[in-house]
Image: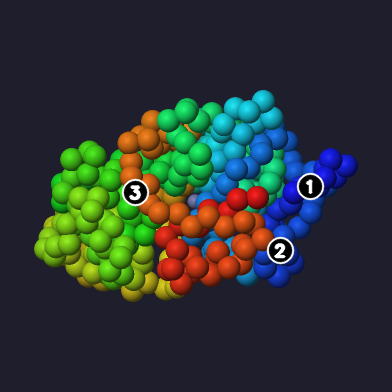
């Protein structure tokens, strides 16, 4: 808690070695409006930067409020919407998408953002942290053909996928080695079955080649997360079955809107909420798989 005479912002930033430290900044850097952070979800893409990307902005799954009390989430990257890549539907490869629109990041008590999105009352409390991950799923879902779809990995994102695919009428089968996560996915209507599938969504790379093997001829594999190591894939299967390989990274303003509309009807995965002081511990819980989703509150 800060005293009235102190305007410093507390934020988790990456030091010169890329390691997280809780720092005090004079003011949230960058342009934009002030957002009081209520909570921010830890994403695999944050964990990926730790130890590797000194100075990188951490935390983009934000639930917060403007100074007038309007509850918002933020868009930390925004495509231009006009260039050839945007028009082709590859907005996350737009040059403007590389610009980070928040500072110092979501793991802070206050940040600045140039693109805020108001949250309706139906998106309650800290649930705003799910808007961005769900927006990523909804954008990617347009690249997944309908039918019998395999979701590889039933972590928090996998559980969103199960619901989004079921909602649009797909038969969803899952691959998940952890018993607890598997049961959570089955409770959401997924099936624990083998056999051929029309499409596969890979949220965990350990199961990527199994997914390739299970795809029916002409099937589609969607890569939805960055691998943390080299992943062997049967190119022969891709060739002989004439498979399609797709990638989808991040979200767009349209998919943010769709996510806000859909969010209240979903069963959100269980969350572990920790204060910013316990950031390193929260990252470890996530890495070990002991927490499905970690949300940090100031
Ligand atoms: Zn994310
Ligand atoms: Zn563009």
Which one is earlier in the sequence, the residue at label 2 or at label 3? 2
The residue labelled by disc 2 is 21
Residue at (79% x, 54% y) in the render: 24
Q: Is residue 253 above or below residue 196?
A: above
Q: Does the rendering let one see residue 292?
A: yes
**Distance CA(mark 2)–CA(mark 3):** 31 Å
Mark carried by residue 2: 1
Q: Does the rendering let one see residue 96?
A: no
The front one of 209 and 33 is: 33
Disc 2 residue crowd, few under 14, some 14–19, many 20+, Cα 10 Å: some
Which one is earlier in the sequence, the residue at label 1 or at label 2? 1
Indicate which label's residue lies in the foreground, 1 or 2. Answer: 1
On the rendered structure, is 148 left or right of 91? left
Q: Where does the image place residue 278, in percent across and percent down from the top left?
A: 62, 63
Residue at (66% x, 37% y) in the render: 35
Mark carried by residue 160: 3
Q: Where does the image place residue 56, in percent across and percent down from the top left?
A: 66, 57
**Distance CA(mark 3)–CA(mark 1):** 36 Å
| Local secondary structure at mark 1 | loop
């Amino acid at each position: 808690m800060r005293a009235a005479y102190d305007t410093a912002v507390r934020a988790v930033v990456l030091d010169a070695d890329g390691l997280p430290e809780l720092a005090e900044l004079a003011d949230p850097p960058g342009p934009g409006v002030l957002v009081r952070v209520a909570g921010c979800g830890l994403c695999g893409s944050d964990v990926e930067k730790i130890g590797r990307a000194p100075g990188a902005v951490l935390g983009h799954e934000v639930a917060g409020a403007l100074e007038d009390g309007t509850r918002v989430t933020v868009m930390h990257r925004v495509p231009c919407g006009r260039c050839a890549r945007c028009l082709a539907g590859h907005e996350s490869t737009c040059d403007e998408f590389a610009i980070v629109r928040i500072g110092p990041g979501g793991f802070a008590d206050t940040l600045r953002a140039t693109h805020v999105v108001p949250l309706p009352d139906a998106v309650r409390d800290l649930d705003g942290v799910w808007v961005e991950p769900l927006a990523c799923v909804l954008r990617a879902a347009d690249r997944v053909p309908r039918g019998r779809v395999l979701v590889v990995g039933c972590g928090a994102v996998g559980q969103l996928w199960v619901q989004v695919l079921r909602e649009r009428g797909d038969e969803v089968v899952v691959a998940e080695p952890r018993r607890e996560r598997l049961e959570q996915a089955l409770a959401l209507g997924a099936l624990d079955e083998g056999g051929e599938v029309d499409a596969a969504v890979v949220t965990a790379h350990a199961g990527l080649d199994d997914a390739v093997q299970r795809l029916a001829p002409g099937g589609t594999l969607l890569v939805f997360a960055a691998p943390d190591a080299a992943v062997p894939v049967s190119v022969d299967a891709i060739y002989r079955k004439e498979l399609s390989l797709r990638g989808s990274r991040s979200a767009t303003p349209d998919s943010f809107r769709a996510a806000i509309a859909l969010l209240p009807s979903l069963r959100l995965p269980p969350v572990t909420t920790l204060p910013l002081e316990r950031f390193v511990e929260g990252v470890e819980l996530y890495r070990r798989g002991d927490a499905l989703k970690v949300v940090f509150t100031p």
